[in-house]
Amino acid sequence: MNTTNSRGEIIVDGKRLETLWIGRERSDQPTIVMLHEGLGSIALWKDFPQQLAAHTGCGVLVYSRYGHGSSDKLMEKRPVNFMHHEGEVVLPELLDKLSIARPVLLGHSDGGSISLIFAGRYPERPRALVLEAPHVFVEDLSIASIAQAKVNYETSDLQQKLARYHANVDATFWGWNDIWLDPNFRDWNIEEYLAAIRCPVLCIQGEQDEYGTRAQVDAIAGQVPQTEIMMLPDCKHSPHRDQPEKTLARIVGFAGRAVRSDDALVAVKERPTSVGIAVQQETT
């Protein structure tokens, strides 16, 4: 299936953000909005957004957050609650300005955490969540791996590799690394948002994830009944790169079920005499 790509920019929360639309003309289908990892950007997703659009039939919006990719350069130290601000202020403003109603959010790592914050703060807005390696609290493993990333950035070719994906690579890297290694960040926790989430959730976690353990996705499933968990062997922190075929297939199937169930529930709400439809729950 051919897809139409459209690059652009938008001002959100006073910052210029780069955007990429794929298959934007598909108004009869929900939009998948992709939120990248802590060192991610539009470019670092590579061809995965195009694969999603082609296999789901949905329009896909990808954007680089402030301080990432070709968006505005990060000019200040990130606060501990920077992901809260992204989920409660930036993302809803972005969706409103682009007239995206009831999206499927696909968040990787920090992007997954931002998606959870948004869904907990605005439970009626998302249609479904797809979360790759999300964080809901800080683990010792996360801190150890981020500390090692600092060493790698200073002593290896990591800076040169990341520069392919970020216009201001030093600001991007240190903005991410400094806040995660800040002692005040050790108490960061977003579990309070989980109980309010009403939409279906798919969590995909690599069994060899160097930044988090299964405890993260189990915490989500413990408070969000409509949660599916997919644990992937031979997979680290990026399922869509480490196990692309399995990851894509599961997302496509989940998104299709979530959209059909949501459409059915909307139809029921429009018929007051109907008894309701149960949404499928599946845990792997």
Image: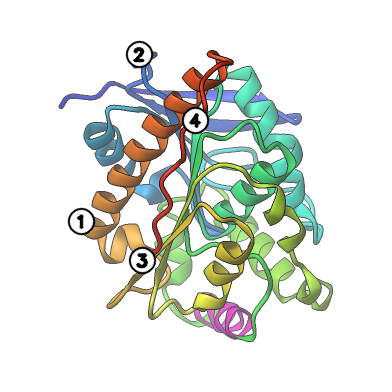
Residue closer to the observer: 71 or 58: 58
Q: Nearer the viewer, mark 3 or mark 4?
A: 3
Q: CA distance from mark 2 to mark 4?
A: 15 Å
Task: Find disc 3 in the rendering and name its residue.
Answer: 284
Task: Find disc 4 in the rendering and name its residue.
Answer: 19
Q: Nearer the viewer, mark 3 or mark 1?
A: 3
Upstream in sequence: badge 3 or badge 1? 1
Upstream in sequence: badge 3 or badge 4? 4
Q: Position of residue 93 (x, y in %)?
A: 69, 27
Task: Find disc 1 in the rendering and name its residue.
Answer: 245
Q: CA distance from mark 3 to mark 1?
A: 17 Å
Q: Amino acid at mark 2?
A: Glu
Q: Nearer the viewer, mark 2 or mark 3?
A: 3
Q: Amino acid at mark 4?
A: Thr
Q: Position of residue 31 (x, y in %)?
A: 44, 27
Q: Position of residue 131 (x, y in %)?
A: 48, 54
Task: Find disc 2 in the rendering and name its residue.
Answer: 25
Q: Nearer the viewer, mark 1 or mark 4?
A: 1
What residue sits 44% from the left and 51% below the top?
165
Q: Is residue 36 above or below residue 12?
A: below
Q: CA distance from mark 1 to mark 2?
A: 26 Å
Left or right: 94 in relation to 44: right
Mark 2: secondary structure? loop
Few, some or many C-alpha atoms within 10 Å of disc 2 (few <14, some 14-19, many ≥20)?
few
